[in-house]
Amino acid sequence: MTKIAFIGVGKIGQTIVYSSVIDGIFDEIMLYDIIPELPDKFEHELRHAFASRGVKTEIISTNNIDDISNSDIVVIAAGKPRKPGMSRRDLFKDNAKIMIDLASKLPSKNHGAIYVMVANPVDMNASVFAKYSKEMVISTGDQVETMRMRSFIAKKLHVPVNEVDGFVGGEHGEDAVVLWSTVSVKGLPISEYNINKEEVEKYVKEIPGEIIRVMGGTTWGPGTIIADIIKAITLNENRLMSIAMPRKFEDEIIHVSVPTIVGRKIGPSIESLIDEQDRWHLTSAMKDFYDVYKDMLKSLESVENAR
């Protein structure tokens, strides 16, 4: 029996839930949100969709976090969303407080669960949740950037997207780096093609902000991609995906994406197989992440201590 809990069922949360569960791979799903009636009404929507598809998955909805129990997987999408003109890091103080609260409540009733962090800034929130819960948590990391990169290269070269391979690593957001040594098209290294690498890198970093500016948020892309991560865990697919596992860096546990095998067991990564230049970029991203994360932790702790 596979049981999954979704913490936060706002706009992106709903997209992830639907994309994850519509194929009926779960025995039971739990929906939690702090907003009164939202989980209940979303449950009804899902039941209507399930009726059309013949999906037998049981659904439980609640506004009480204590009802979330005995989960195999817990997906955390709770928190304030990114708005036009904001960076993901701008969300840290508000959303990190939510992670600290959830870290104090979820583990005692969900022994052995894998936690999948979605809420932005996703890597820092994963690190905060891990710090305060001591549980296994992965960040969905740069799998979204990876698919953005592949789709853009496919469009520029006029090839089917399934002919493009390769990964983005580092931090989800400002420090994401295209790992060019992993990128190929039709089995040939990307160096064999006439592609502007700077244009690709700019697209990967800037297109989310442009989508948010025009559409108010990114939903269908991330929702589908994150659902694939959840399915890889649930079905033990052992897919290579650019997610962030917890790692020790100096005195903190941090999350920075590297292409990693994802199934019921998370890992290993292929970090050792990436060329020297890409590893240098990853190390640089880790150092930058750590420095910013430590500063933000100090700021968060000073606010908490002032209360």
Image (cartoon, grey):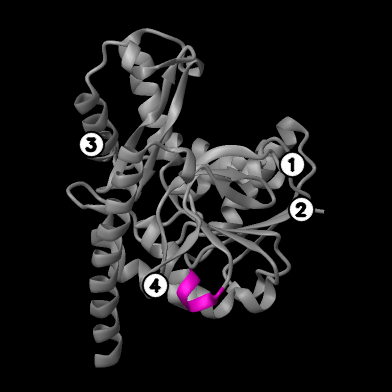
Mark 4 vs 1, N-terminal side? 1
On-image quarter of the N terminus: bottom right
Q: Which residues are magenta?
A: 130-134
Name the secondary structure under disc 2. loop
Rendered location of residue 137, percent (x, y): 54, 62
The answer for how far apart the CA atoms under marks 2 and 4 are is 32 Å
The answer for how far apart the CA atoms under marks 3 and 4 are is 29 Å
Check whether the beta carbons of the residues at disc 3 and disc 4 lie within 8 A of each other.
Answer: no
Name the secondary structure under disc 1. loop
Q: Which residue is mark 4?
A: 252
Check whether the beta carbons of the residues at disc 3 and disc 2 lie within 8 A of each other.
Answer: no
Q: Does the magenta segment cover residue 131?
A: yes
Q: Quadrant of residue 287?
A: bottom left
Name the secondary structure under disc 3. helix
Nearer the camera: disc 2 or disc 4 = 4
Check whether the beta carbons of the residues at disc 2 and disc 1 lie within 8 A of each other.
Answer: yes
